[in-house]
Image (cartoon, grey):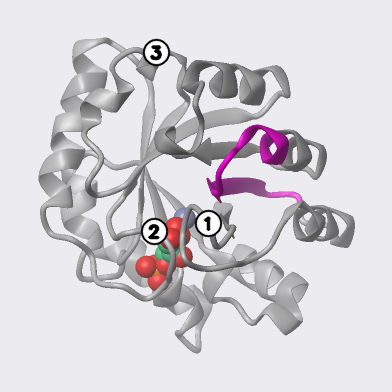
Amino acid sequence: MQIAPSILSADFARLGAEVDAVLDAGADIVHFDVMDNHYVPNLTFGPMICSALRDYGVQADIDVHLMVEPVDAMIEAFAKAGASMISFHPDATPHMHRSISLVKDLGCKVGIALNPGTPLHELEEVIQYLDYVLLMTVNPGFGGQQFIPQSTDKIKRLKQMIETRKLSTLIEVDGGINAETIKQTYDAGADIFVAGSAIFNAKDYKHSIDSLRQAVK
Ligand code: DX5
Ligand code: ZN
């Protein structure tokens, strides 16, 4: 299992130190939530912050979750800024296949992100090109929301879809993941676990990351 703290809940005034702290505490991936006040009703940070983290010395994979519309210009900017993984939502681009190819051509891992209300059949024609699928387990836009319980069944159905096609696509879950909700998503087949508030709102990051790992046992 890979733990990906969402820096949406970090102290932005000390962002470099916050990222160092979660990586020292055992996090695997840095989850970077990009919001444009258009695709979602909130505004966060762009490629300059991503390249600033690289310049600061962050070596871990940076997992860019684009909640922006349109996506192609941001894909190019984030690949240049040092992103390792880039996901976007299918309803944020008129040409999903072209945007997927763009991410891959720029040397990043590619994922499609699905909102709770978006059906899995959106993946039908493209799943074979994806490194991962990001399943939103809350509606996108804000940290600190409650996990939507119906998501567990959707994870199981996605896992089945991947296995039937004999693919090695990873499943990333994002939203409301904490020590109480993580086990059902792990048992259902998730591989990468994004957690924002459950990690950054705790005093001891190592303790909160260890608790997430313990909770699936
Ligand atoms: C929501 C973001 C999530 C969010 C997760 O739009 O995609 O990554 O920050 O935050 P928590 O873990 O607090 O639900
Ligand atoms: Zn996210």
Quadrant (top left, top right, bottom left, bottom right) of the C terminus: bottom left
**Residue placed under numbered mark 3 in the picture:** 128
Where residue 125 sits, quadrant-wise, is: top left
Callout 1 amino acid: His
| Residue lying at 43% horizontally and 64% vertically, measured from the top left | 141
Q: Tell me if the residue at label 2 has its CB under 8 Å from ligand 1.
A: yes
Apparent side of residue 73 relative to residue 36 in the rendered image (left or right): right
Determine if the C-beta at disc 3 is less than 8 A from ligand 2: no
> Residue 210's image quarter?
bottom left
Query: For mark 2, what is the residue?
Result: 140
Position of residue 205 relative to residue 212, above or below, is below
- Which one is in front, 184 or 100? 100
Regarding residue 137, the answer to whether it shows in the image is: yes
Q: Position of residue 116 (x, y in %)?
A: 24, 49
Crowd tier of the residue under label 1, counting other residues whose Cα lies within 10 Å: few below 14, some 14–19, many 20 or above: few
**Could you say where residue 29 lies in the image, as x and y percent from the top left?**
57, 51
